[in-house]
Amino acid sequence: MKPEARASILDLWRMFGAPKAALILSGAAGLLAGGSSAGLVMLVNRSLSGGAEGADSATPLVFTGLCALALISSSVSVALLSRIAQENQYRLRMRLAQRILNTPAHRLESCGRHRLMAALTDDVQSVVAAQEVLPFLFVEGAKIVAAFSYLAYLSLPLLGFVLFFVVFGVLSYQFAQAQAMRWFALARETDDALFRHLRALTEGYKELMMDARRRTAYLEADLERTARLLRNRLNRANVIAVLANNWSETLYYVCIGAILFVAARLVETPQATLIGFTLAILFIGGPLSVIFNGIPAIAKGVVALRNIEALRLESSDNPLAPVDRPVEGASPQTLALAGVTYRHQGQGENGGYPIGPFDFVIRPGELIFLTGGNGSGKTTLALVILGLYAPTTGEVRIGGERVTDGNREAYRQNFSAVLSDSYLFDSLLGYGEGAQREQAEALLAMLELDHKLRIDGGRFSTIDLSRGERKRLALLAACLSDSPFFLFDEWAADQDPKFRDFFYRRLLPDLKARGKTVIVITHDDRYFRFCDRRLHLTVGQLEELQPHAPDLPAAAVLE
Ligand SMILES: Nc1ncnc2c1ncn2[C@@H]1O[C@H](COP(=O)(O)OP(=O)(O)OP(=O)(O)O)[C@@H](O)[C@H]1O
């Protein structure tokens, strides 16, 4: 995946999310600051080389004016830039979030959560840090151009001498910087692995606390090894970058020495010109070090941008046409799968099997139970039905209309689902007002959660609940959207007998009575008889069984 990533410094500029006008204003203020500092140098040079006569009565006034101008314009430039940086970070993060939500679920799964988190945190920061440096490159570059023009005005032969050092310096610096960039890229790869281990730490701390042997192995073999590798790679990258900077700084002083002690002897040069040259070159030192210090940040930014590219996220500029959920209470339509198969990435090569082909029709208002052993493909089929996975072959049709990449987002809005690994938000997110708020209160009581939490301003007062209670809260959130289709993936697995009974005997019949189509993934064979139809999966192949039929003969289970 990585070789496709080809982002460059130009992309850093293009990706600037903040208004370009503010950036240009900041650049202009920076140029004014640079111009005033260059003016100050010229004034100092004129005063030094002309003695007392070099300065007329207006000179102190002009000097003070230039000082004030330099102070004000550089302050304006920096203040604007810091605002722009914050705005940029905010916009980049929002755009990245939009891109993630526009990207098909299977592609996000293959990226891994740790890489997405690293992109949203580290990479965004690196990109913004690099973008902050960009305007300085122009401003400081302009100062250098102004100083070189001044040098050309003072002496062309000496300028040739300086240019030789500049070309040599830039080439050697470029070489060292390329090495540093290589190590920054390797360090960034290790960063992804570190995020994965840190996730294991935050999510698996209980398992690690319970078993000292496992904990030691995790700390030593996983976390410490990766953290050490990251430290070493970053050290190497930083040392090379610093050496490159020091080298360029040394060359700079060598250049001044060469002019004073070599060139001045080879080329006849008046004292005033030599002073002017030295002052101008000393002046260039400031902008040069800003540029050289900024280059590692740009290198890191480009690496971060390449990382984001490597995730192959969809564009944020081209979100699928914004769609609303169907009108409240819309009735379900016929759902048909024809020749549908689904293959997970790497399936076949790494073992496992694609599921399907599936050919079946679900009629409006049916209560379907999807059953089958572990790993038989129930959740995968459910994700295809929900439109989160696009079929590898075959087609899904709703109300006779084919589901395509263009309308899949609209199709998904027909479903409310509680998945087995569903995420519980701490608020009702768009369902906390009016009738839905009242409905939420009623459901809270019905699910016997009202003594555990309240809903204030559309937000749950707590979600620190037991697993079964969290699932009940997820069910509440799903029921609020009043979609035509409902899908529950092993919802009752975490429930006590009372709520399991409530689910199969009350909630599902209620949804059916309201005309909803309901698909339930379940292992609860005691309740199989409550469905209209039972679709059973065995190793990715589907057959329709009688609701009452047992799964497998007991003897077969024992075998
Ligand atoms: N994200 C994934 N990437 C690659 N393969 C996967 C992925 N998710 C599932 N699989 C493969 O697909 C097979 C079917 O998985 P699925 O989750 O659909 O089974 P299931 O019937 O829902 O199982 P269970 O009853 O245990 O929940 C698994 O055995 C696994 O090999």
Image: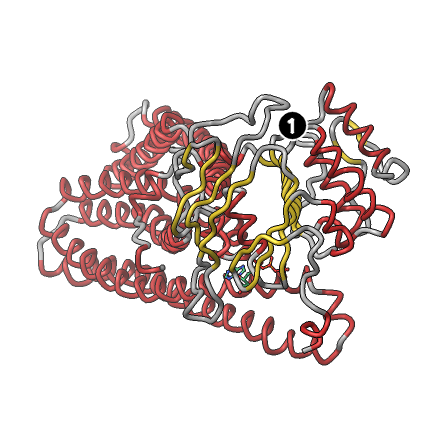
Q: Residue at x 45, y 52 (%)?
A: 107
Figure quadrant of residue 172: bottom left
Q: Is residue 128 left or right of residue 457?
A: left
Instruction: From this view, report whether residue 182 is shown above or below residue 437.
Output: below
Q: Residue at x 47, y 65 (%)?
A: 353
Q: Is residue 301 visible?
A: no
**Extreme-bottom residue of the structure:** 213
Q: Nearer the viewer, residue 393 or 339?
A: 339
Q: Residue at x 44, y 46 (%)?
A: 390
The quadrant of the image that shows the N terminus is: bottom left
Callout 1, which amino acid?
Gly
User: Which quarter of the rendered image does ligand 1 occupy?
Assistant: bottom right
Expressed as whole percent of the image width and height from the top left, the position of residue 231 reads 52, 69
Expressed as whole percent of the image width and height from the top left, the position of residue 123 reads 47, 51
Q: Is residue 503 left or right of residue 166?
A: right
Q: Residue at x 78, y 43 (%)?
A: 503
Instruction: From this view, report whether residue 108 is shown above or below residue 441.
Output: below
| Helix, strand or loop under label 1 | loop
Expressed as whole percent of the image width and height from the top left, the position of residue 528 reads 72, 51
**Extreme-right residue of the structure:** 451
The residue that disc 1 covers is: 430
Q: Nearer the viewer, residue 50 or 177?
A: 177
The tally of labels here is: 1
